[in-house]
């Protein structure tokens, strides 16, 4: 799935394999001597924070953005990096949940006002942070927003608590 900076209502664009057929599972990258780490590539965009601020995209520009994301997804799959990816609907569709003193409180909209909002993510496997950063730099969203790269906690590791320090 893809994240996009353009306001166009709800959309879902499935990533596809280079052949045009449905995506297949990423090739196995694990070897006994290699330690593969999972990283979240979080795509932030100014326009997803306030979708009403963005004019509707030109159809040709929209198509180019979708093509760029499909090519990026294909590249991740071909390299055995792709684990998952999803686009998020605008923050105006969010509901925030808090539990305080045993009471559940819900609020329409995002928790905090911000200039940038999370528009989507990729979950990738990489040998190390440097490789994950190279993958993130190739993400189309890096051209118009910001990309945050974070390692994912490995709960099967012997020292899980150490990953939180």
Image (cartoon, rainbow, N blue to C red):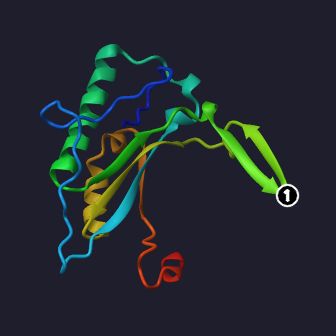
- Crowdedness near tag 1: few (<14), some (14–19) or many (≥20) residues, C-alpha within 10 Å: few
| Mark 1 lies on residue | 102
- Residue at the image position 29 percent from the left and 22 percent from the top: 63
Image: 107 above or below 156: above
Secondary structure of the residue carrying numbered label 1 = loop
Say how many tags the image has.
Answer: 1
Q: In the figure, 46 relative to 10: above or below?
A: below
Image quadrant in which the N terminus is located: top left
Please tell me which residue lies in front, 53 or 73: 73
- In the picture, residue 140 is in which quadrant? top left
Q: Position of residue 157 (x, y in %)?
A: 41, 79
**Residue 49 x/y as whole percent:** 57, 36
* 115 left or right, relative to 58: right
Comparing 75 with 113, the one in front is 75
Q: Quadrant of the C terminus?
A: bottom right
Q: Position of residue 67 (x, y in %)?
A: 24, 29
Q: Residue at x 25, y 58 (%)?
A: 134
Q: Residue furthest left?
A: 19
Q: Looking at the picture, how far across and down is residue 44, in whole percent? A: 47, 44
Residue located at (63% from left, 31% from top): 92
Q: In front here: 12 or 127?
A: 12
């Amino acid at each position: 799935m893809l994240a996009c900076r353009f306001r166009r209502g709800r959309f879902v664009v499935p990533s596809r394999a280079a052949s045009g057929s449905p995506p297949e599972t990423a090739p196995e990258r694990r070897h006994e001597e290699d330690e593969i780490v999972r990283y979240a590539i979080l795509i932030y965009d100014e326009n997803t924070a306030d979708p009403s601020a963005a004019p509707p995209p030109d159809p040709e520009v929209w198509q180019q953005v979708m093509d760029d994301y499909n090519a990026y997804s294909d590249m991740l799959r071909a390299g055995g990096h792709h684990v998952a990816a999803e686009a998020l609907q605008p923050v105006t569709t969010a509901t925030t949940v808090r539990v305080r003193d045993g009471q559940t409180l819900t609020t329409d909209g995002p928790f905090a006002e911000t200039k940038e909002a999370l528009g989507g993510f990729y979950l990738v496997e990489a040998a190390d942070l440097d490789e994950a950063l190279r993958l993130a730099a190739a993400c189309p969203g890096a051209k118009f927003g910001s990309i945050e790269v974070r390692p994912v906690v490995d709960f099967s590791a012997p020292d899980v608590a150490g990953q939180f320090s």
